[in-house]
Image (cartoon, grey):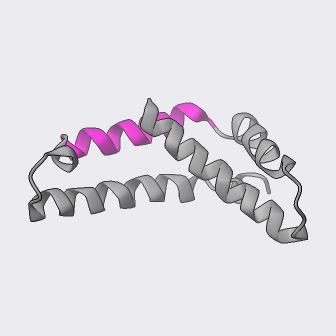
């Protein structure tokens, strides 16, 4: 669940940057607006399921202690999957 919140946070941060970039003002409400939009517009269960699937497919290879190329490769794949989940659920796309 912790990693799901990281993806949700990334989605909200990306959208708050989008809101800021439109007016470039120092309005701290952009993040709150983005987080509220995330809660209302997305199906959090979809994000949770996608994150859980990414970690299940990883089978904890990304978290092994040894600095092996297999671990580094697995981390890169997992990171790319989590970023893809965030971008696939981009708030700008869902708010049109």
Please give left or right for residue 15 compared with residue 25 in the image: left
53 above or below 45?
below
Q: Does the magenta segment cover residue 55?
A: yes
Observer-nearest of 25 and 58: 25
Say which quadrant the N terminus sits in: top left
Q: Does the magenta segment cover residue 57?
A: yes
Please give left or right for residue 24 compared with residue 11 in the image: right
At horizontal 42% and vertical 42% (from top left) the residue drawn is: 50
* Position of residue 9 measured from the top left corner of the image (x, y, whole percent): 59, 45
Say which quadrant the C terminus sits in: bottom right
Residue 67 location, quadrant: bottom left
74 above or below 51?
below
At horizontal 36% and vertical 36% (from top left) the residue drawn is: 52
- The range drawn in magenta is 43-59
How many discs appear?
0
Majority secondary structure in the magenta region? helix
20 above or below 38?
below
* Position of residue 40 measured from the top left corner of the image (x, y, whole percent): 75, 35
* Position of residue 15 measured from the top left corner of the image (x, y, whole percent): 71, 56
At horizontal 73% and vertical 41% (from top left) the residue drawn is: 35
Please give left or right for residue 67 compared with residue 50 in the image: left
* Position of residue 19 measured from the top left corner of the image (x, y, whole percent): 81, 61
Residue 49 location, quadrant: top left
């Amino acid at each position: 669940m912790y990693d799901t919140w990281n993806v949700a946070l990334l989605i909200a941060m990306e959208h708050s940057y989008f809101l800021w970039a439109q007016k470039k003002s120092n309005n701290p409400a952009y993040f709150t607006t983005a987080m509220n939009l995330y809660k209302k517009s997305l199906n959090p269960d979809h994000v949770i399921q996608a994150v859980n699937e990414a970690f299940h497919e990883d089978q904890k290879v990304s978290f092994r202690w040894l600095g092996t190329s297999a671990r580094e490769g697995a981390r890169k794949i997992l990171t790319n999957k989590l970023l893809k989940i965030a971008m696939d659920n981009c708030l700008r796309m869902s708010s049109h």
